[in-house]
Image (cartoon, helix red, strand yellow):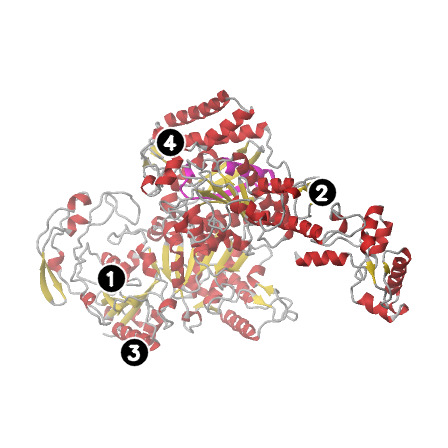
Amino acid sequence: MHRAHTAFSLALSPMAHKNFATWLINSNSSQRLAKVTAAAAVRTYNSAAAEPFANGSTASYVEEMYNAWLRDPTSVHTSWDAYFRSNTYVSPPNLAPVQANTLPLTAFNFGGAVSGAAPDSKTIDDHLAVQAIIRSYQIRGHNIAHLDPLEINTPDLPGNSSTKTIYANFSFGEQDMERQFKLPSTTFIGGDEASLPLKEILNRLENVYCNKIGVEFMFINSLEQCNWIRKRFETPGVLNFSPEEKRLILARLTRATGFEAFLAKKYSSEKRFGLEGCEIMIPALKEIIDVSTELGVESVIMGMPHRGRLNTLANVCRKPLNQIFTQFAGLEAADDGSGDVKYHLGTYIERLNRVTNKNIRLAVVANPSHLEAVDPVVQGKTRAEQFYRGDQEGKKVMSILIHGDAAFCGQGVVYETMHLSDLPDYTTHGTIHVVANNQIGFTTDPRFSRSSPYCTDVARVVNAPIFHVNADDPEAVMHVCKVAAEWRATFHKDCVIDLVGYRRNGHNEIDEPMFTQPLMYQKIRKHKNCLDLYADKLIAEGTVTAEEVKSVAAKYENICEEAFVLAKTETHVKYKDWLDSPWSGFFEGKDPLKAAPTGIKEETLNHIGNRFSSPPPNAAEFVIHKGLLRVLAARKAMVDEKIADWALGEAMAFGSLLKEGIHVRLSGQDVERGTFSHRHHVLHHQLVDKATYNSLQHMYPDQAPYSVSNSSLSEYAVLGFEHGYSMTNPNALVLWEAQFGDFSNTAQSIIDQFISSGQSKWVRQSGLVMLLPHGMEGMGPEHSSCRVERFLQMSSDDPDYFPPESDEFAIRQLHDINWIVANCTTPANYFHIMRRQIALPFRKPLILCTPKSLLRHPEAKSPFSEMSEGSEFQRIIPDNGPAGQNASNVKKVVFCTGRVYYDLTKLRTEKQLESDIAIVRVEQISPFPFDLVKEQANLYKNAELVWAQEEHKNQGCWTYVQPRFLTSLNHSRDVSQSDEQSSYSNTTTTTSTTDNTTNNETNSNSESKPWLSRMFTTSNTESNQIGGESTSISGNFNAAKHFDLKNVKNDFNRPAGIAAAPGVRKSKTGRKISYVGRACGASTATGSKAQHIRELNALLNDAIST
């Protein structure tokens, strides 16, 4: 305020503004002139006696001098030259443009000044105080707005008890309330009026900012955006609705309330997570969609938790009610899949918006119980749809995310997703966030669930305006939704609507909330619902009659009753009815068990290799780093030799898919260069910022687009984003690469809830590829293992069941598995498995352990012949050396996967055991290649079989492959406590398993009974050989009977008739698989490089010994 007062005083200073007098003399207001000139005296230049400054001749002289100086600075005296050069002189107010955040003198009211005197300091201070008050309301009005329908909770902020606290520091009394004050340009409360009495200013500000709407926006660092919001809320009359609009709100609110009441009546003991207390969310969503549709949006993708999902499906998406009611019936499914609870399901609907008379596509993405996990998935799906539509500004496709209050502030993925909002390769050009604020999280009060005043404060970090609104005021909610939709369409940025309501029932309908919130629920029990409050309001004002209100409610109840009767005729539920991402035409006309070949013409390999190894066409102008020039030269040399390393093999897979019209998107941390500086898909000009070149984008003139995007330092949100991206178009290869493989564990919810089980729960396929750098190379515990054992644990093939062998064995396994886990050792196999993702007639996620040291390993290269026509992905790579050519003399066969193969072959060569030891690589770990393992075992009939891995015994692949090896070796089952003597040893030596045939046959005759009935049966005493000691174990556990399950699904990877293979294995061949590797450990790797080398040498020597 001091600065403003000083600026105002300078405006009257004649030495500061010599031209001010001209403006005053030319002014039509003689009274104003008299008031100013009476006090405006100044000393002359030579400090002589003062004279009135506002003298026409003096002013004219100054103007003439200024104009002469403008024409020629040397034509005036040096003192005038210095004066004008000092920028002290300013053009007359009638000529100078009004600058931002400044006001001309005419903006001030001098009515209180004594005639013939300049405005006193109080007048100036009062005008500035009014501006400060207006700004205070705009900044802090939301603190005291009436947002809580229950009137029990207020933000934990200082001084929020009264509106007087906002202007308490300004010395205005009752005598000032009728004084007129000029309104500044930073407010729109006056409408067409330029000034208002102080009392009216305060009343209007309180009505705008302290009523049922609280707006947080003054933290936004854009004056244009702040003024836009001010205008939408401050302009008089913005909350005036026509009778027709009010009736529409009432009808929509009636449907939302009626749906919850109908479910409560028909399914009183069922969990449904209803919206009671926040039913206005349904009309709110419909208003957002209506306004957005009117503004050009054609597709809306929504993500939400379980609360209110059924109501949203019914009344926003218009999902047929009978399909929703069928979900309560507990019917068998008509199609494959495990299904999910009804309040997790999604849908996809195309319908006519009756308000705007435009077609709209609505998708609600299926979501697990992890409340906010769906947020990045929705954003990825939205971004993909925008990309494939060519919607570069987000005008046609938008996303709406619905949150709970406790989850919105409590779940870190919200923050991660928010930070994607403005990233060039991840933005969806604005998301509308709707918070269904129940003011409680399950049983936890807000004061114990967050440290911030509001649950929405996370949105402030991305400059998203936040609109708090009382959920019991439907018209205020509709206005906020209209503004939010217009904001998104105007600025393409996020915004948040905080619907402050309550939860009429407990966390679910059969929960008792009075245990933990007795006072709150005493008020809720007495509180009228929103529909009754609004109906009473409209009846009182004469907009509708009581009979009309009852008629609308009765009509909707009849609709529900008819759908309820129809639902009773259904005999099965169909999971496909709830698919949120249909792929129109993708599966039609395809043989589900026939994949396209993955090999390509050598001519194509050469073309891609040459382009990938060449600098930009304007290489003379594009300055490339000298180190990259060497990289390009090395690539060119490999192309000439017709061999490929890992980076070149990857580029050939991508380039060939791009040639075929397949969009490729690679995303993750540092993927443009590659964590290990091997990829270099984006070349940077060394002298020009943002000047880049990507050769894979310029392979062919008509190729598909290639996107490679460095992501934010987030795994949870970015992996979810890419999963959502992969759901949109099956004819695209979408890859996410972890910086290091184990970093994927921070995205475990996405992996567990979406990627591994998405098809089973929601009949939703995805071809997403996860690239996880993996290898125990002495880099410490956190940069070694991608935790492949976790992915294998979630693989759905039965370890005790050998599927029927046929020509379609491999593809049938892929068809019925939930995902594919592989660890490739050659660029050629990497090339093929990438292309196989697109060649398959269906889509499965691919979990790929990728190498680190192998990226530059001299032996980890593939000839072009292994990628050309006629070649294919090898699930197992047999030993093609001397051992493979003379199998009968081989003493040991070492099965392994990944980079340890190269360590094993090196040591075998050093020991000259190439003819005695065969090394077989298992490239595809899941689904397990039973047929090929059996083939290799039969080839080496006289050899000892071992599995070698660099990971600890309780990690890596061992626990997954061991029972499957036994199944491949023609066993029924003989897993007992004596199978692995090394389980009780801390050594790292080979652990051969003894053949306890007698014990293995104990209890081998299994009865086919339900597993639960076997829990209480007794078994014979079993003798077990443990650690060399004979111990007798007796009890009521019978393995033969315990593991027998009734059939729940019949697919290729699981036996028909029962869900799991028999629980006791009977040895028919006597052959076993032994373990070679590190002992069990808590950490993935040692932090000591020396210890790592000792452990590695020990396992290598154990494996390469006869």
Disc 2 and disc 1 in contact, CB within 8 angstroms = no
Disc 2 and disc 3 in contact, CB within 8 angstroms = no
Q: Which residue is mark 3?
A: 912
In this rendering, which labeled residue sits more in front, label 2 or label 1?
2
State the separation of the CA atoms marked 2 and 3: 97 Å
- Residue 575 falls inside the magenta stretch: no
Q: Which mark is residue 938?
A: 1
Q: In the rendered image of this protein, does residue 77 appear above or below residue 572? A: below
SS assignment at label 4: helix
Disc 4 and disc 2 in contact, CB within 8 angstroms = no
Q: What amino acid is at disc 1? A: Asn
Q: Which residue is located at x 32 percent, y 57 percent? A: 792
Mark 4 vs 3, N-terminal side: 4
SS assignment at label 3: loop
What are the residue bounds of the magenta stretch? 283-310
Mark 1 residue crowding within 10 angstroms, few (<14) / some (14–19) / many (20+) = few
In this rendering, which labeled residue sits more in front, label 1 or label 4?
4
State the separation of the CA atoms marked 2 and 1: 95 Å
